[in-house]
Image: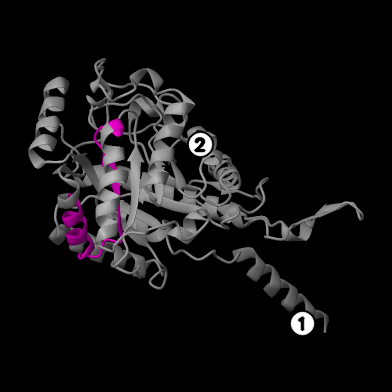
Amino acid sequence: MSSSPSSLHLAVALDGAGWHPAAWREPVARPRELLTARYWADLVAEAERGLLDFVTIEDGLGLQSSHPVDPDGRTDQVRGRLDAVLIAARVAPLTRHIGIVPTVVTTHTEPFHLSKAIATLDYVSTGRAGLRVQITARQNEAAHFGRRRIPQLGPLNDPGTWDSVGELFDEAADYVEVVRRLWDSWEDDAEIRDAATGRFVDREKLHYIDFEGPHFSVKGPSITPRPPQGQPVVTALAHATVPYRLVARSADVGYVTPFDSGQARVIVEEIRGEQAAAGRAGELLHVFGDLVVFLDDTSAAATARRERLDTLAGYEYASDARIFAGTPAQLADLLQELASAGLTGFRLRPAVAGHDLPAITQKLVPELQRRGVFREAYEADTLRGLLGLTRPANRYVTTAAATSTAAAAVGA
C-alpha cells in the first residue's frame, strides 16, 4: 500500500560535514563546530525551512571508517561524533514541524533503554520522533562491550556472510518488536493525575509485555507513558533480501539504494512481497530511495566540485547509494522518474552539508513545488501525520477488553 504518487515525501540524512569524506575541507564547512549544538540546530532549521518531512542523524558504536567492517586508521577525514539521540533531543524543541529521526544501533544495546529514549524524544518534540534502526557486524565495535563475539565477515556474495548478518537482522526485528510493545505498555489514559483523590495513575492500564525470544526477555511495562504518536516512526536502510525482510516486517519507512528506475521497481516489488508475507499487506509502508547529491546551478559545476573533493580525498568517492551531480531541475526529473517505479519518497544525503542542504531546501524544493509534487506548507503536526500514517490503536487495550469480557462471562 502506498501514498499518492502526485505528492513526494522528502527527507535528508545528516552526517557530520556531509557525506563526501572531504566535505569538512570545503570553505562553507564548519569543522570546528561539528560537536556543537548550534551546528546541528542550524542544519535542522534549514531542513524545516524547506518543508522536509524529516531529518535522519547518523550514529555508530565506533569511529567512522571508509572500510565496510574494519577501522581504517585515517586521520584526514572526520572522526568522532555526538550521540544522535541526544542531538535529536537538543534540536527538537527548536523546531515545530519537521520529524527528528536519530540512528540507533540495535546490536549491543538494550531495547528497554531505547524505548524510553525515543518515547521521551516524542514528548520533547510533541509527536515528531522516529528512529532509524541499524545493525553492526564490526568486531572492533563488539570489543567495546565484551558481551559477544562477532565473526569476521567474508565477501557479501558469500552465503556464509549473510547467515551471520541475517542473525543480526533477526535480532533487530525482535528489538523493534520489544520497543513497540513497550510503547504500548501504557494505555493512553493510564495517567489520571487527580490530586483530589490522590490517584496519579491507573495501574490496571499499565501492562506487562512478557516478551520472550531468542535474543531478549523483557517483562515491562515501560517507565515512560505512551508516546504522543502512540508509535514513533520506525525506519531502516536496506540493500538486499535479508534487510528488505526487516523493513517489511518491522518498519514504517524503508530506505533503499536503486541506481535506476528498473532496479527500483524490482526492489519495491520484493519489499511488497515480503510485506504481504509478514501479514502487513494492508498497511502503509513507505519505500524511500537514497541518493547522495551534489547540487549546483550547472551540471559542469556540480561535476567539477565532486572531482575537486575526490582529489582532496585522494580517491574517487563511491557510495552504497547512487551519486547524483547536477542541477535541481535535473534531480527533480530523476526523482519523478524513480517515483514512477513505486518509490514514495526520497532521503537525500548532502555531499557537503553547508552547500547541498541549502540547495535542496532553496532550489530543489521550489522546483518540485512548481511541478505540483511537493507540499507548499506543513499539513500535520506529527511525523506520522506528515507521512500519512494513522495513529495506531494500543494492542493491550484490545487484550485487556477481551480479558475483561471473558472474566464477565465466566462470572455470569
Q: Residue at x 42, y 39 (%)?
A: 44
Task: Say whether residue 380 is left or right of residue 202.
Answer: left
Image-quadrant location for residue 196: bottom right
Outermost residue toward the left? Answer: 300
Outermost residue toward the top? Answer: 75
Helix, strand or loop at label 2? It is helix
Numbered label attached to residue 91: 2
The x and y percentages for residue 381 are: 52, 56
Q: State which region is magenta.
A: 331-354
The x and y percentages for residue 183 are: 59, 53
Report the front residue among 349 and 224: 349
Q: How many marks?
A: 2
The x and y percentages for residue 48 are: 42, 45
Of the residues shown, which amino acid type is indicated by label 2? Val
Report the front residue among 264 and 98: 98
Q: Residues within 10 Å of mark 2 (few under 14, many from 20)?
A: many
Task: Say whether residue 169 is left or right of residue 214.
Answer: left
Numbered label attached to residue 409: 1
- Above or below residue 31? Residue 306 is below
- Above or below residue 91? Residue 226 is below
